Image (tube, grey):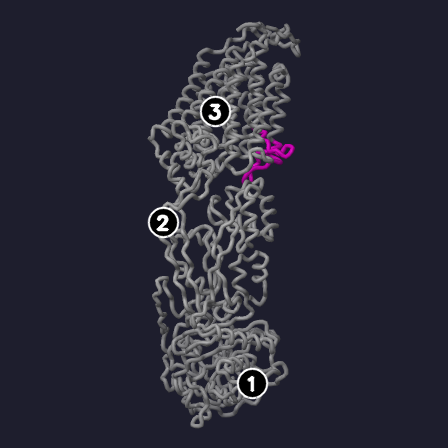
C-alpha cells in the first residue's frame, strides 16, 4: 500500500497543510458501475449499427464513433481524477464565464434539426456544449454553495444561486432545448437542498413555480413543445403525429418480454420505426433486445452508481465535494428518470439523453469529467482511512 | 481541520437530507421498473401485443389503371412497368442528405434541386416514401438497389407508368397522371389514395380519375427483422381494376384535324390555333386539336421542374387546351345570335330589307361596315351572307342588349357546355345586369352595336361556338359535348354514354332553317373564297375579331365555323346546296380558330377546307397557298 504524497496545488483557506493523495480511496465500485453502463451503451451502438445495414467497422458508423468517444471519455476521466479538484474552486468564476461562452457560441453558430441551434461542429464532429455546461454549472454551484454551508438559511442564498443558474438556463432555453434547461433546474434545486438551504424558502419557491406554470404554458412554450409534453398522456390519440415516437417506443419495450429478443434482433430497431432510436429513444431498443431483465440490470447499475456518488458526497469533508457529488447525482437521476420515463410513457417527451447509453460524445465526456472530478475529491480528503 | 477560517465549524452534511435523496433514487428506479414490468411482462398494457402486429403490416395493393382507346378501339394509353426511385425521409439523416441527393442526382441524371423539392413537398409524413424519379433505366435501378448502404433512405421500386402511344397527338384530351399534392391527399385519403400516389392531372385522365383508377386493395405482409418482405400473409381486400374508356375521337380523324391545323398555321405564320370537329346529332367530339401542344409522356416519365417551368412560361401556352379553356371575341360568327333573334322575335321577316351603308353614326361616332360602300338594301340572306356589319348593328339595336343576350344564352353562350374535360371556361354574354354587376355601369347604345357583330364584351370558347352552330345544324337542340363514348368495366361490361340535351333553342324551326340557308349563302357568296367549289355542300360563318381596345395593332383572330349536311355531295337537283342545308341531318360540324392571324385571307377557312378535303377524300386540292399576300380581308 503506497500513499502518494503531493503538494496541494495551493494552500487553501481551510487546509493549511498539504493534501495527501490517497489512491486507496479511489472508488473502484463507482468506476466499475460506470464501466458496465458504458459497455451497455456500446452494445446498443453495435446493435444499432448492425441493423442499419451498414458495416459495423465501416467509415463513420455509430459503433466506431461510440468507440472513439469512449476512448476520449476514459482519457478525460483519468485526467480529471489526477487533477487536484481544489483548483476548480480557484477558477470557479472563470469557469462560469467559459460555460456562458460555450452556450452563447452554440446559440450563435450552432446547428440542429429544424432551425434549432443545439450543437457546434468541432473538427467535423457535432458536439453539444450544453452537456459540458451542465458539469460546469455543478462546479460553479458547488463552489458558491459549498463556501456558504451553514449560512444558507436566508432567502439571499437561494437568490444568489438562482442568479448564477439563470443565464445558462435561459441560453439553453433559447436554443431551444427545454430538456437540458430542466436538467439545470434539477441540479439547482438538488444542490440547494443538499447544501442545507432553508426548507421554508425552498418550499415557497416550489409553490410559486407551480403557480407560474399556467403562465409559462400559455406564453412561453411553443405549440410543438406543448404537443410533445402532453402526447404521453394519450399516445394513441395521434399515432402518426406527436404520439408516434411514444407509440413505437412502447411497442418496442413491450416486445421485449422477460429476456428480450436478443441484441440486433429488435424489429423496431431494424425497421427504423423509431425516429431517434440511437439517441433519445435508445432505451426502448435496449428494453426490446435485452428484455425486462436487461432493463432492470441497467436500472440497478444506475442505482448502484448513484449510491457511490452519494457516498462520495457524504464522506467528503470539503463542502465543495458534498455539493458537487449531490449535483452530479441529481443530474444523473433526473436524466435517468425523465429519459426512461419518457420511453415507457410516464414522462413527457423532452429529448434528454440517457447517460452512458444514448450515443453522443458530449454527454459521455461530460459524465466522464464529472465522475473524474468525483474521484479526485475521493482521493484528496487528506485522510488515510474512512 | 473542518472549519472555516473564522473558526466556525463547517456543519456536517445533513443525514436526513441524504436519506431523502437516497429515497428519491430508490423510488424513481422503483417506479421505472414497475412500469417496465407492466409493459413487458405483466401484460397490463397492450403494447406487447402491438409488437406482433407490427411485424405483419397492412399495405395497399394498387389496382390496375384503366386503359384509354380511341373510337375504333386502338389503344391510346398503356401501362408499362418502369423503375421509380423513392426516398423515405425518415431514413435519410439530415447530415447526409445533401451528399445523398448529390450522388443520386448524378446517377440518375437529375437536377439535385428537383430531388430536394420532391422531398420537401412530400405530401405524406416523414415515414412515407416520396417519389423522386420515374422511368429510371434498368442498369441504374440495379446499381441503386445494390448501393443502399451508401444511399440511406433511397429505394427502387417497380411501378407501372402511363405510356401515351401517340405522344402529343391526344395530349390535351388525354391529359396525364402526376404525383398527388399534400392538399389533394387530405381530401382523397379516405378514398384510399397513398402519399406517393399518382392521379389524373389533365384531360380525361383527370375527369375520369375515379373510373380509371378502380379501387385499391389491402394485403397483409409479413416482414423479417430487417424489414424485408417474407411473404404475403393474405389479401384482405382484392383490388378492383379500373374501367377502361373509349373516346368518341378517332385517332385517324384527330390526325387529319391536326394536319389541317398545323398546315394552316404554318401557311399563315400562326403561333396558336384550334380545330374541333363534332357530331351535331349527339354532341360527340370527333376531333379536338389545340396547338402548340406538349407530350403527355414527359409528365408520366416524371418531368423535371425546369422543363415544367419552360412549358408554363411559354407565351403560347402549350399546356392549355384552347378549345375549351380560353375565351376569344367571336366576331362575325356571333351574327347568328342577332339574326336568329330579330327573326324569332318578329322584328323582321326573311324578306324585310334594311339599308346597309359604309357606316352608321351613333352619338357622333362612326360605326363602320367592313365594306366601305355597304350593300344597299339588304335582307337577312344578304346581311348574313355578306356579313354586313351595318345590317347587324341595326338588328342588335332592334333587339336591345337584354334580348340579344337572351338569344346568346339560348345558343349556350355564357355558360360552360359541360364537356367531360377539365378547366372549361364559361365566356361572357353581355346584358344590362351583367355590366351593372361587373362594371357598375349600364350598357351604352354603341355597345349594343358591338355585341351584334360579336365584339366588345362578348367572349366565347371555341367549343361554345361549335356547339351553337351544331344546334343550328340539327334544328335547335343543344347537346352537351363529350369525348368519352363508353366505359368498359374490368369485367368487360360496356356502358355507353348517352347524349345529354342541354336545351332547345327557343326559335321556330323555320327561323333556324332561314339561318342555315343564310349560312350557306356565306359560302355561295364566296365570302369563303373557293370553298364553294368543293364537290360537297358546306354552310358556315367566318369571323374576324379583335379584342376590344383603342390600340391599333391588336391581334386579329380568324374564325370559321361550319357544318356539312348528311350526304353532302352536290347533286344536279340541288346545285346550290340550299335543299341540303334546309335539312337538319348534319353529322359533321367543325370550328377553326387562327389566333393572332395577320393573314390577308381567312386562315381558319383554309384549315376547315383542308380538313374537309382530307375527311371526304377529295383528291383535288383547293387550298390557297398565298395566305400572306391575298387582299381578301372580309369578315
Q: CA distance from mark 3 to mark 1?
A: 94 Å
Residue shown at the point (47%, 46%) measured from the top left: B128
Q: Which residue is mark 2?
A: B235
Q: Which residue is mark 1?
A: B621
Residue shown at the point (62%, 14%) measured from the top left: A86
Q: CA distance from mark 1 to mark 2?
A: 63 Å
Task: Using the image as rendered, state which of residue B137 and residue A130 is in the foreground.
Answer: B137
Q: Share a chain, discs 3 and 1?
A: no
Q: Tell me if residue B520 is in the magenta stretch.
A: no
Q: Residues within 10 Å of mark 2 (few under 14, many from 20)?
A: some
Residue A81, image x and y in percent? 60, 16
For mark 1, name the chain. B
For the magenta stretch, what is the residue range? A104-130
Task: Using the image as rendered, state which of residue B465 and residue B154 is in the foreground.
Answer: B154
Residue B337, image x and y in percent? 44, 80
Marker disc for residue A334: 3
Residue B8 position by quadrant: top right
Residue B77, image x and y in percent? 47, 64
Amino acid at each position: 500500500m503506497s500513499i502518494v504524497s503531493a503538494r496541494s496545488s495551493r494552500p487553501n483557506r481551510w487546509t493549511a497543510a498539504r493534501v495527501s493523495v490517497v489512491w486507496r480511496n479511489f472508488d473502484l465500485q463507482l468506476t466499475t458501475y460506470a464501466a458496465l453502463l458504458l459497455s451497455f451503451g456500446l452494445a446498443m451502438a453495435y446493435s444499432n449499427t448492425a441493423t442499419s445495414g451498414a458495416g459495423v467497422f465501416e467509415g463513420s458508423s455509430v459503433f466506431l464513433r461510440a468507440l472513439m468517444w469512449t476512448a476520449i471519455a476514459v482519457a478525460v476521466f483519468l485526467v480529471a481524477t489526477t487533477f487536484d479538484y481544489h483548483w476548480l474552486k480557484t477558477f470557479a468564476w472563470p469557469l462560469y464565464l467559459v460555460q456562458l461562452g460555450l452556450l452563447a457560441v452554440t446559440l450563435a453558430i450552432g446547428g440542429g434539426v429544424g432551425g434549432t441551434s443545439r450543437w457546434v461542429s468541432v473538427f467535423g464532429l457535432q458536439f453539444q456544449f450544453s452537456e459540458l455546461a451542465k458539469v460546469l454549472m455543478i462546479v460553479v454551484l458547488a463552489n458558491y454553495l459549498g463556501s456558504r454551508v451553514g449560512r444558507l438559511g436566508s432567502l439571499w442564498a437561494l437568490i444568489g444561486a438562482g442568479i448564477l443558474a439563470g443565464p445558462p438556463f435561459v441560453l439553453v432555453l433559447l436554443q431551444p432545448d427545454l430538456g437540458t434547461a430542466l436538467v439545470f433546474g434539477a441540479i439547482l434545486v438538488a444542490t440547494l437542498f443538499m447544501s442545507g438551504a432553508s426548507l421554508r424558502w425552498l418550499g415557497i419557491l416550489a409553490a410559486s413555480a407551480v403557480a407560474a406554470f399556467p403562465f409559462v404554458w400559455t406564453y412561453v412554450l411553443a405549440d410543438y413543445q406543448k404537443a410533445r409534453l402532453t402526447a404521453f398522456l394519450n399516445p394513441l390519440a395521434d399515432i402518426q403525429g406527436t404520439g408516434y415516437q411514444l407509440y413505437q417506443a412502447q411497442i418496442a419495450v413491450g416486445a421485449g418480454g422477460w429476456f428480450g429478443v436478443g441484441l440486433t434482433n429488435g424489429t423496431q430497431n431494424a425497421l427504423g420505426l423509431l425516429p431517434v432510436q440511437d439517441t433519445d429513444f435508445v432505451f426502448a431498443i435496449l428494453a426490446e433486445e435485452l428484455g425486462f431483465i436487461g432493463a432492470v440490470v441497467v436500472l440497478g447499475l444506475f442505482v448502484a452508481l448513484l449510491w457511490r456518488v452519494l457516498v462520495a458526497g457524504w464522506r467528503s469533508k470539503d463542502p465543495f465535494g458534498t455539493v458537487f457529488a449531490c449535483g452530479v447525482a441529481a443530474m444523473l437521476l433526473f436524466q435517468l428518470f425523465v429519459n426512461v420515463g419518457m420511453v415507457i410513457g410516464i414522462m413527457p417527451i423532452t429529448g434528454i439523453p440517457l447517460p452512458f447509453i444514448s450515443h453522443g460524445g458530449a454527454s459521455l465526456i461530460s459524465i466522464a469529467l464529472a465522475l473524474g472530478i468525483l474521484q479526485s475529491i475521493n482521493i484528496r480528503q487528506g485522510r488515510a482511512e474512512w | 481541520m473542518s472549519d472555516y477560517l473564522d473558526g466556525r465549524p463547517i456543519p456536517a452534511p445533513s443525514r436526513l437530507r441524504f436519506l431523502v435523496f437516497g429515497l428519491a433514487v430508490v423510488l424513481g428506479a422503483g417506479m421505472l421498473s414497475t412500469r417496465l414490468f407492466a409493459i413487458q411482462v405483466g401484460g397490463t398494457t397492450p403494447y406487447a401485443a402491438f409488437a406482433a402486429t407490427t411485424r405483419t403490416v397492412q399495405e395497399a395493393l394498387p389496382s390496375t389503371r384503366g386503359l384509354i382507346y380511341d373510337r375504333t378501339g386502338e389503344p391510346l394509353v398503356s401501362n408499362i412497368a418502369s423503375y421509380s426511385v423513392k426516398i423515405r425521409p425518415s431514413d435519410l439523416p439530415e447530415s447526409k442528405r445533401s451528399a445523398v441527393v448529390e450522388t443520386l442526382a448524378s446517377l440518375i441524371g437529375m437536377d439535385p434541386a428537383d430531388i430536394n423539392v420532391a422531398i420537401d413537398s412530400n405530401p405524406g409524413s416523414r415515414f412515407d416514401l416520396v417519389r423522386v424519379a420515374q422511368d429510371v433505366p434498368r442498369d441504374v435501378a440495379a446499381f441503386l438497389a445494390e448501393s443502399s448502404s451508401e444511399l440511406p433512405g433511397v429505394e427502387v421500386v417497380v411501378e407501372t407508368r402511363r405510356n401515351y402511344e401517340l405522344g402529343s397527338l391526344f395530349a390535351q384530351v388525354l391529359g396525364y397522371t402526376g404525383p398527388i399534392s399534400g392538399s389533394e391527399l387530405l381530401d382523397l385519403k379516405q378514398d384510399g389514395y397513398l402519399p406517393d400516389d399518382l392521379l389524373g392531372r389533365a384531360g380525361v385522365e383527370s375527369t375520369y380519375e375515379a373510373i380509371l383508377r378502380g379501387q385499391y386493395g389491402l394485403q397483409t405482409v409479413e416482414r423479417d427483422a430487417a424489414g424485408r418482405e417474407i411473404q404475403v400473409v393474405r389479401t384482405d381486400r382484392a383490388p378492383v381494376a379500373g374501367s377502361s374508356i373509349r373516346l368518341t375521337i378517332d385517332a385517324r380523324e384527330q390526325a387529319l384535324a391536326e394536319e389541317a391545323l398545323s398546315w394552316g398555321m404554318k401557311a399563315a405564320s400562326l403561333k396558336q390555333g384550334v380545330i374541333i370537329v363534332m357530331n351535331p346529332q349527339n354532341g360527340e367530339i370527333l376531333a379536338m386539336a389545340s396547338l402548340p401542344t406538349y407530350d403527355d409522356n414527359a409528365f408520366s416519365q416524371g418531368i423535371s421542374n425546369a422543363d415544367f417551368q419552360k412549358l408554363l412560361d411559354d407565351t403560347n401556352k402549350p399546356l392549355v387546351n384552347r378549345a375549351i379553356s380560353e375565351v376569344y371575341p367571336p366576331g362575325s360568327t356571333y351574327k347568328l345570335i342577332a339574326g336568329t333573334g330579330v327573326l324569332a322575335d318578329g322584328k323582321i321577316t326573311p324578306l324585310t330589307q334594311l339599308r346597309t351603308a359604309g357606316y352608321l353614326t351613333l352619338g357622333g361616332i362612326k360605326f363602320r361596315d367592313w365594306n366601305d360602300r355597304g350593300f344597299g338594301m339588304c335582307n337577312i340572306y344578304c346581311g348574313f351572307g355578306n356579313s354586313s356589319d351595318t345590317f347587324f348593328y341595326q338588328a342588335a339595336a332592334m333587339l336591345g342588349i337584354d334580348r340579344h343576350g337572351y338569344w346568346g344564352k339560348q345558343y349556350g353562350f355564357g355558360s360552360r357546355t359541360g364537356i367531360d374535360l377539365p378547366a372549361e371556361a364559361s365566356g361572357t354574354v353581355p346584358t344590362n345586369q351583367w355590366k351593372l354587376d361587373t362594371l357598375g355601369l349600364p350598357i351604352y347604345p354603341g355597345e349594343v352595336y358591338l355585341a351584334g357583330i360579336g365584339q366588345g364584351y362578348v367572349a366565347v370558347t371555341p367549343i361554345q361556338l361549335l356547339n351553337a352552330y351544331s344546334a343550328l345544324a340539327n334544328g335547335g337542340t343543344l347537346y352537351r359535348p363529350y369525348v368519352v363514348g363508353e366505359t368498359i368495366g374490368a369485367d368487360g361490361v360496356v356502358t355507353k354514354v348517352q347524349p345529354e340535351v342541354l336545351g332547345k333553342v327557343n326559335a321556330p324551326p323555320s327561323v333556324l332553317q332561314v339561318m342555315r340557308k343564310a349560312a350557306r349563302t356565306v359560302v355561295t357568296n364566296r365570302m369563303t373564297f373557293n370553298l364553294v367549289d368543293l364537290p360537297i355542300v358546306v354552310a358556315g360563318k367566318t369571323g374576324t375579331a379583335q379584342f376590344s381596345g383603342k390600340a391599333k395593332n391588336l391581334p386579329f383572330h380568324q374564325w370559321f365555323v361550319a357544318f356539312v349536311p348528311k350526304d353532302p355531295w352536290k347533286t344536279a337537283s340541288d346545285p346550290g346546296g340550299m335543299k341540303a342545308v334546309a335539312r337538319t341531318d348534319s353529322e359533321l360540324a367543325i370550328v377553326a380558330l387562327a389566333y393572332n392571324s395577320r393573314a390577308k385571307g381567312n386562315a381558319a377557312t383554309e384549315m376547315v377546307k383542308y380538313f374537309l378535303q382530307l375527311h371526304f377524300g377529295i383528291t383535288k386540292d383547293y387550298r390557297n397557298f398565298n395566305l400572306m399576300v391575298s387582299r381578301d380581308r372580309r369578315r
